[in-house]
Image (cartoon, rainbow, N blue to C red):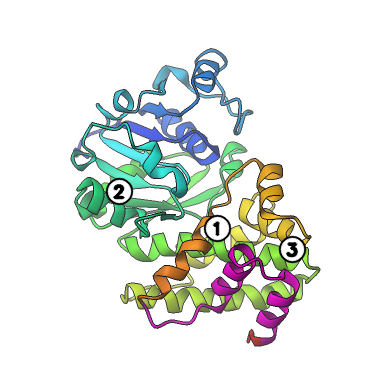
């Protein structure tokens, strides 16, 4: 990103709730935003009605600062910064038609998941598959739910990048009365924390669906943060405060919030829904589902105990009884 005054030209890739929230923030701050989404119907609706018909439809968008298209190359070509906000399971498919080199852009990921097939976090995938230098890769993390951004409730975002100037400039592009940004150079820790907290929110939801109460949830989350600390330290052993908002804060909001789709998904599983029926009823992607299926493979590379993640995996992918698996897990929590 050039060291210049606003506005910036920002490409947002994805059409869901968080993509819509980020578009709201960027356009209200006088940045030119190019927005890619799959649905031509949604594109036309936004142009005419100034809102996303499928997600956060109450948000009125500043279309004077907005170019919306299903042509990903037209969206990315003139952008200084590309922000990826699609589910990790669909990232490769979303970029399949992209011919504009990402290696010439600053790329921030708001994706909280692992890329299937490659079994990499998004930052590593961008570096290895799209040749984006690590100093041009960043992460947008919470604690922040898109729904509260839509309501303009005070929200915190963490911007992590090896080149802190890139993080600082994106922070400038996001200034708003209801947004506070925190900067970090811990790309690996921030991204892994964002992945793990979704799995832990699934666990919290499953326990809630099974009838466990608030007293137990407190014990569960305290164990989750210790497990997160162990895993991230094994993957990327640098000095960090796991109690900071990017780690513990994001874990708390995802585990407890009414807006957490991962907690909601887990709650449905705990109540006896099948995975397919829960997905159909939610009509939204719970990133923790995909993350739970892939984190097990990452664990093989590290000597670290992650019993909470493994328990969620057994329920979702080995079709074990939620009641039996979580009872056994509850008995070993400290």
Which dot, 2 or 3, sits closer to the camera?
3
Element assignment for label 3: helix
Residue 9 x %, y %? 30, 29
In terms of image quadrants, where is residue 297? bottom left
Residue 128, relative to residue 295: is it above or below? above
Left or right: 322, with 155 as reference point: right
Residue 226 x %, y %? 51, 79
Q: Residue at x 49, y 32 (%)?
A: 24
The crowd level at tag 1 (other Cα within 10 Å; few <14, some 14-19, many 20+) is many
Q: Earlier in the sequence, mark 2 or mark 3?
A: 2
Pointer 2 residue: 168
The crowd level at tag 2 (other Cα within 10 Å; few <14, some 14-19, many 20+) is some
- The magenta stretch spans which residues? 302-331
Element assignment for label 1: helix
Residue 253, relative to residue 306: is it above or below? above
Determine the residue located farthest toward the front in the rendered image. Answer: 318
Q: Between marks 2 and 1, how big is the CA–CA gap? A: 29 Å
Q: Between marks 1 and 3, how big is the CA–CA gap? A: 15 Å
Pointer 1 residue: 288
Determine the residue located farthest toward the right in the rendered image. Answer: 211
Q: Earlier in the sequence, mark 1 or mark 3?
A: 3
In terms of image quadrants, where is residue 267? bottom right
Pick whichever, 278 or 124, lies toward us.
278
């Amino acid at each position: 990103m050039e060291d210049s005054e606003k506005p910036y030209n920002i490409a947002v890739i994805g059409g869901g709730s968080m993509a819509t929230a980020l578009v709201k923030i960027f356009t209200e701050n006088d940045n030119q935003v190019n927005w890619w989404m799959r649905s031509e119907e949604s594109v036309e609706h936004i142009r005419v009605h100034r809102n996303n018909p499928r997600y956060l439809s109450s948000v009125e968008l500043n279309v004077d600062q907005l170019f919306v298209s299903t042509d990903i190359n037209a969206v990315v070509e003139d952008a200084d910064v590309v922000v990826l906000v699609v589910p990790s399971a669909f990232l490769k498919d979303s970029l399949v038609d992209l011919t504009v080199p990402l290696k010439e852009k600053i790329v921030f990921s708001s994706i909280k998941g692992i890329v299937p097939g490659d079994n990499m976090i998004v930052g590593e995938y961008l570096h290895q598959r799209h040749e984006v230098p690590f100093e041009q890769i960043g992460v947008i993390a919470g604690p922040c739910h898109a729904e509260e951004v839509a309501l303009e409730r005070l929200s915190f975002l963490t911007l992590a990048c090896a080149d802190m100037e890139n993080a600082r400039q994106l922070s400038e592009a996001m200034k708003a009365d209801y947004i506070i940004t925190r900067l970090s150079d811990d790309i690996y820790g921030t991204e892994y924390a964002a992945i793990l907290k979704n799995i832990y929110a699934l666990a919290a939801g499953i326990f809630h669906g099974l009838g466990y109460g608030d007293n137990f949830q407190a014990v569960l989350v305290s164990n989750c943060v210790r497990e997160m600390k162990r895993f991230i330290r094994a993957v990327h052993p640098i000095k960090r405060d796991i109690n900071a908002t990017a780690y513990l804060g994001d874990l708390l909001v995802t585990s407890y919030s009414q807006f957490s789709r991962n907690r909601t998904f887990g709650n449905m599983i705990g109540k006896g829904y099948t995975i397919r029926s829960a997905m159909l009823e939610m009509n939204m992607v719970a990133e923790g589902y995909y993350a739970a299926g892939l984190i097990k493979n990452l664990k093989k590379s590290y000597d670290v105990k992650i019993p909470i993640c493994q328990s969620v995996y057994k329920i979702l992918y080995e079709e074990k009884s939620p009641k039996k698996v979580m009872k056994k897990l509850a008995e070993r929590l400290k």
